[in-house]
Image (tube, grey):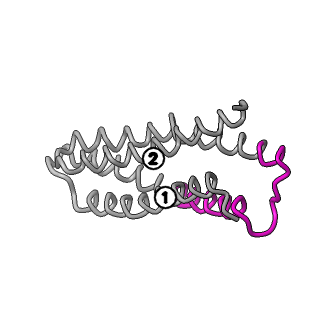
Amino acid sequence: MNGWLLMHLLGVLLAVGNIVTAAFWKVRLDQSGHPAVVHAAARNVMLADYVFTIPGLVMIVVSGSIMAEQAGMSWTGFNWLTLSLVLFAVTGIIWGVLLIPLQRRMIRLSEESIAAGSLSAAYRAASRSWMIYGTVATLLPIAILYLMVMKGF
């Protein structure tokens, strides 16, 4: 296995693994209803994105670009690589435009909920939106993973 492929696989493991794991724990801890626990979960989801997801995405982009170039892959036309890149861009847009602002809002609202003693309706609404957009932003990388492995067209 060459070094670029190893870097690519490690990046996928970091990014997709963190996306799924962080979402699982955040949803589970939201169910506790304890504002301090929910606040800690919201803060740690954001931290995990910076520690795992972002470095994983950088590794994916760098190694994937180099391997595609070395293999002489076409960056134009409609094929598994260009579809994967479009889906990757859509995921990035969802993450940057919707999920990160929602995460910041959930951190702020959950902190305010600690003083109130219960989670606010505003927090619950932000969390629900995060779950909806987060589900889409999780399914897209799984579709990309399928395309990368199967290289169907």
Q: Residue at x 34, y 44 (%)?
A: 42
| Magenta run includes residue 81 | yes
**Residue 82 in the image: x percent, y percent?**
72, 62
Q: How far separated are the C-alphas under marks 2 and 1?
A: 9 Å
Position of the C terminus by quadrant:
bottom right
Q: Amino acid at mark 1?
A: Ala
Badge 2 vs badge 1, beta-carbon distance below 8 Å: yes
Per the rendering, the mark at residue 19 is 2
**Eyeballing the image, is 17 above or below 77?**
above
Q: Which residue is mark 1?
A: 137
Q: Name the residue: 37% across, 63% down.
A: 129
Q: Residue at 34% across / 60% down in the picture?
A: 126
Q: Which mark is residue 30?
A: none
Amino acid type shown at disc 2: Ile
Residue occupying image coordinates x 81% and y 54%: 73
Q: Nearer the viewer, residue 66 or 114?
A: 66
For label 2, the SS is: helix
Find residue 131 and report its horizontal and vertical position in percent. Answer: 36, 59
Q: Looking at the picture, does residue 52 appear above or below residue 119?
A: above
Q: Few, some or many C-alpha atoms within 10 Å of disc 2 (few <14, some 14-19, many ≥20)?
A: many
Residue 81 relative to residue 73: left or right:
left
- Which secondary structure lies at badge 1? helix
Magenta segment: does it hold 20?
A: no
Horizontal arrangement in the rendering, residue 52 relative to residue 4 (left or right): left
What range is drawn magenta here? 67-96
* 147 or 104: nearer the viewer: 147
